Image (cartoon, rainbow, N blue to C red):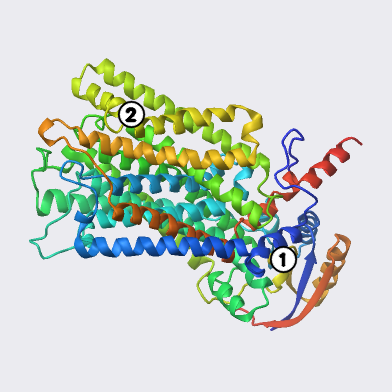
Amino acid sequence: MATKQIIHGIYNDEVPLLEGCKKLRESGIRIADVFTPFPVHGIDPIVGVPRTRIAICSFIYGITGMSLATLMMWYMMIHDWPVDIGGKPNWAYYFNIPAFIPITFESTVLCAAHGMAITYFLRCWLVPGARPKNPDPRTTDDKFMIYLELNDEQSKKADEILRSTGAEEINYKGTITIEPKY
Amino acid sequence: MHAESQIREPLILGNKTYRNITDDIIAPIEGKATRLWYILFTIACITFAWGIGCLAYTIGVGIGAWGSNNGVDWAWDITNFVWWIGIGHAGTLISAVLLLFRQKWRMAINRSAEAMTIFAVCCAAIFVLLHTGRPWLDYMLFPLPNQFGSLWPNFNSPLLWDVFAVSTYFSVSVVFWYIGLVPDFAMIRDRVVNPVAKKIYSIASFGWGGNVRHWSRFEEVSLVLAGLSTPLVFSVHSIVSFDFATSIVPGWHTTIFPPYFVSGAVFSGFAMVLTLMLVVRKAYKLEAYITVKHVEYMNIVIIVTGSIVGVAYLTELFVAWYSGVEWEQYAFLNRATGPLAWSYWIMMTCNVISPQLFWFKKLRTNLVFTFILSIVVNIGMWFERFVIIVPTLCRTYLPSTWNTYTPSFIDVGIFVGTIGMFFVFFLLYSRTFPVIAQAELKSILKSSGEAQKKEAAHHSHH
């Protein structure tokens, strides 16, 4: 069982924030999270967040949408009830494929966009009624916060780094107990 | 931090801080509505009510209540549908295409432009749903399993492509808009004091926290959605134009229609954005964010798309003559000199001549002139759709079917009603939603703020 100190390091600008993050990582301190009012570019590699794979999901959803549309139109127009409409070929899907392109495209976009949006909301757990995830409400306005969970020894080092890089507030928010993993 | 060239004009005027941006964007939400707002809202509600009355009457007695007749079976309904859908296109263009091109000036206007898109598509939907004649059977537009011997819709028909295109466009636009809104709702949630408002914004913000992973996914999702929306927006108006272009009616059966419709749509959409934003910046004191430079950029888009539309009109005339097809030639002769020639010349004046005035820098940076011209452009674009539809259907192949067209009171009522509905939605939106994407705007403050740019210039001299 280990007890860890929760530290909120609050900055009023993104430049010293990035500096602080860099210094913390250099001295081997793990940054639990950073809360900012807008996307700060270049922070991901510093904090150690890998590139999101959500675009790959979107591609897979898109392919799914394309296949579903093709299957649907083949079933309805060719297999289930072929109708002669203005002499357009109705005996094989590939003969009449130009007429099916627009809906194939729309369905691809529909599934890619909505699938990705749903994945995004669920992966971030952004759902109606979810509790606000920022510990300090000022981080959606004009404050930038480094959130740390550290043991006593690291806390001292982190405090020094936060202070030297220009954090305007360092708040100690109590401790948490972390169960060891077996 | 990327420094921006000093030659580029600042996009955020004055000495703003992150806190100032928050305060300025939240001011219309926290503050009381002005008298002007109440007056506009009352007028919008009355016209909306008139529209609902005419709509109910149409559903009650059928579309015989309209001016449409045996020959002119598409008239104001489809004119209004295409007009509204076209207006919607600017929103997606601003938020998607300008995002892909990394145009920072979009950030001041994309939120309201997307709201405009969504409301405009709602207005357009009314006409398509109603013009089927029996709106309670509109579910038959979708390929649902049914008991009519399993009768499926016709996937060869551009009208069905339209159903898929417009519903995809609407739902994707809503999602794109909402994903951008979540961080801004969170900002309001963390700021407002009224407990009821806090609760509502808390639910609407989905528990947004703004940590690194969320922002990283947010940016990726925005980029991919922009990439998906760009071909989507072009496909929607192309498919709308297929409704005409795949028919064999002279004057409609042309391959130029898709690009011509898309540029016309962007043209009218930007005009509507200007009409709305010029009022919003004044009413909510957002002059520091929606600057004259923004207006100038939008006016440049209007010159470009307006010129494309002008070239398309002339190309149509040339091709009609050059093709040697008598019916095609007559269709255009009839538009320009026939009984409804006045509408053709209104269209030509408003769409071809008026945007060319923006070549003068004095005029395109004059806000009053821009406001008037933005309305002129939308009148012109409404007449464009009217000219394509009505005079053409008045004179088709069989002279025995030739007739004329007058709109009924109900036609006018539904059209004016949708304008009322649009403004009811927009006015409510402007008082409850963050009208500028403030999170995104804060990210360009350092590079494009006036004071910040001056300071950067000062530093570079030493």
Looking at the image, residue A170 sits to the left or right of residue A149; the answer is right
Mark 2 nearby-residue class (10 Å; few <14, some 14–19, many ≥20) = some
Question: For the residues marked 1 and 2, what is the alpha-carbon distance in whole angstroms?
Answer: 60 Å
* Chain hosting mark 2: B
Secondary structure of the residue carrying tag 2 is loop
Kind of residue indicated by mark 1: Arg
Instruction: Mark 1 and mark 2 in contact? Answer it, CB < 8 Å.
Output: no
Looking at the image, residue B41 sits to the left or right of residue A19; the answer is left
Residue B50, horizontal then vertical, whole percent: 37, 62
Kind of residue indicated by mark 2: Ile
Q: Quadrant of the C terminus of chain B?
A: top right
Q: Which residue lies furthest to the right in this view?
A: B462
Q: Nearer the viewer, residue A178 or A22?
A: A22
Q: Which residue position is annotated with label 1?
A: A30
Residue B40, horizontal then vertical, whole percent: 54, 60
* Chain hosting mark 1: A
Looking at the image, residue B24 sits to the left or right of residue B252; the answer is right
Q: Which residue position is annotated with label 2?
A: B256
| Residue at left offset 28%, top offset 47% | B407
Mark 1 nearby-residue class (10 Å; few <14, some 14–19, many ≥20) = some
Q: Can residue A61 be seen in this view?
A: no
Q: In which quarter of the image is residue B403?
A: top left
Q: Can residue B40 be seen in this view?
A: yes
Q: Nearer the viewer, residue A110 or B386?
A: B386
Looking at the image, residue B199 sits to the left or right of residue B146; the answer is right
